[in-house]
């Protein structure tokens, strides 16, 4: 299965949730995509309640369900 590109998968402003695979400290936290990372599979995000952004591999992210 081919992996979609950054712009097709995670657009700036998209709401995301961090999966449990990222570890207990980050699991289930929510945030917003603020840009692409240095590498094609990395995504810059800012978590809700945080002032700074961080870079995570896209395998640790999923889209947040709208309710």
Image (cartoon, rainbow, N blue to C red):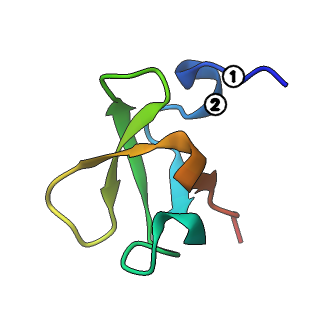
Tell me the crowding category of disc 1: few under 14, some 14 to 19, or many 20 or more residues within 10 angstroms, Cα based.
Answer: few
Q: Residue 55, percent across and down?
A: 31, 44
Q: Is residue 39 above or below residue 53?
A: above
Q: Secondary structure at mark 1?
A: loop
| Among the two numbered marks 1 and 2 on one chain, the one whose residue lies closer to the N terminus | 1
Residue behind mark 1: 4
Q: Secondary structure at mark 2?
A: helix
Instruction: Please tell me which residue is depicted at 39% across the width and 46% down the height of the picture.
Output: 56
Which quadrant does the N terminus fall into?
top right
Instruction: Please tell me which residue is depicted at 38% across the width and 22% down the height of the picture.
Output: 39
Q: Is residue 19 visible?
A: no
Q: CA distance from mark 1 to mark 2?
A: 6 Å
Of 49 and 61, nearer the camera is: 61
Q: Nearer the viewer, mark 1 or mark 2?
A: 1
Tell me the crowding category of disc 2: few under 14, some 14 to 19, or many 20 or more residues within 10 angstroms, Cα based.
Answer: few
Image quadrant assignment for residue 50 = bottom left
Q: Residue 48, percent across and down?
A: 33, 68
Q: Is residue 25 above or below residue 58?
A: below
Instruction: Please tell me which residue is depicted at 54% across the width and 23% down the height of the picture.
Output: 6
Question: Which dot marks residue 9?
Answer: 2
Instruction: Please tell me which residue is depicted at 44% across the width and 81% down the height of the picture.
Output: 24
């Amino acid at each position: 299965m081919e992996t979609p590109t950054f712009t097709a998968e995670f657009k700036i402003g998209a709401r995301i949730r961090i999966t449990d695979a990222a570890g207990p400290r980050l699991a289930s936290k929510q945030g917003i995509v603020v840009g692409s990372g240095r590498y094609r599979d990395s995504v810059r995000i800012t978590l809700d309640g945080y002032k700074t952004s961080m870079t995570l591999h896209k395998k640790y992210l999923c889209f947040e369900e709208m309710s």
